[in-house]
Amino acid sequence: MARNCRVFRGDLVHCGRRGGSANLSLMSAVRITHFTDPHLYGGEHESLRGVATLPALTAALAQARARDWPPDAVLVTGDLVQDDPAGYPHFRRMFGALGVPVLCLPGNHDEPQAMQRELAGEPFVLGGFVDLGRWRIVLLDSCVPGSASGALSKPELARLQQALATAGKRHCMVCLHHHPVPMSSRWLDRVGLANAAEFLDVIDRHRNVRAVVWGHVHQNYDALRKDVRFLATPSTCAQFLPNADDFAVDRRPPAYRTLELRADGSLLTEVVWVEQHSNGSSRSACSAA
């Protein structure tokens, strides 16, 4: 069924469905497919850490469309390109015709002005928040120009506070690029969210937050903190070796995550490793209510 995304009050975005039977407030669950860190270049065969990024993303998207389609929205949490604005047309071509809203936020390798220009208009949603069924999806910009690490500016923290405070009876999932909790990896934790304590203070003051989701770390992470699910999704290209003091590449294949956000505030999630490289998945269910 066609989606209708409209912008109101500046950068706040609401996506609805056309048709009387498609009242999103009545949806029993919201299905989201999460891709992150594709690191695209302008060239179609350029590689990052031994993985050709565009073919890897193509394979991940093809597997998702064959196995887990359609979701209510697609989420992409940064590093769409690898410091190369010429990669955005590839992203626009691949995701622009999916027929679902594509919720995007920037990573430290993105070019913000080019990203805004190339992904302007439907189906792309950049920043703000999206209400889907009984859930509010909040999209944050944690990028600091010229830095691999991240931070949330005071205006961004204020927008987060407002989005959570005005969610009403909706459950909230908060999305950003940089990790707000330690990953037990010395080198990686040097480039996380610098003001994580301020971010977590906002999260802790709002009992409607059910999940926090990020990219950047190129590995799976799944933990419960104060009844909130904290999730990192592996990249659609190369992965980083978990628990490594120094930088190291993991041999695990490209991946994406599926999320089923239920009306009671619980969620079901699964990391899907791309079949052409490896079979299997990592599935878990948890109530964050």
Image (tube, rainbow, N blue to C red):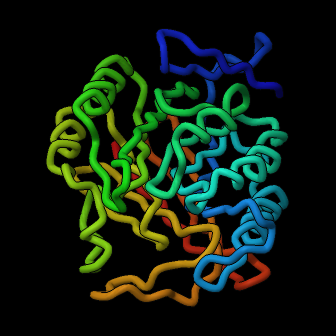
Spot occupied by residue 162 in the image (x, y as percentages of width and height) = 30, 21
* Residue depicted at 44% across the width and 34% down the height: 138
| Residue 105 as seen in the image, left or right of residue 200 | right
* Residue depicted at 49% across the width and 87% down the height: 249
Q: Front-most of 94 and 184? A: 94
Looking at the rendering, which quadrant does residue 123 occupy? top right
Spot occupied by residue 285 in the image (x, y as percentages of width and height) = 48, 59
User: Could you tell me which quadrant the N terminus lies in?
Assistant: top right
Q: Front-most of 249 and 64? A: 249
User: Could you tell me which quadrant the C terminus lies in?
Assistant: top left
* Residue depicted at 72% across the width and 27% down the height: 122
Looking at the rendering, which quadrant does residue 169 occupy? top left
Placement of 279 over or under 92, stated as above or below: below
* Residue depicted at 68% across the width and 77% down the height: 47
Count the labels in the image.
0
- Whether residue 55 is visible here, answered yes or no, is yes
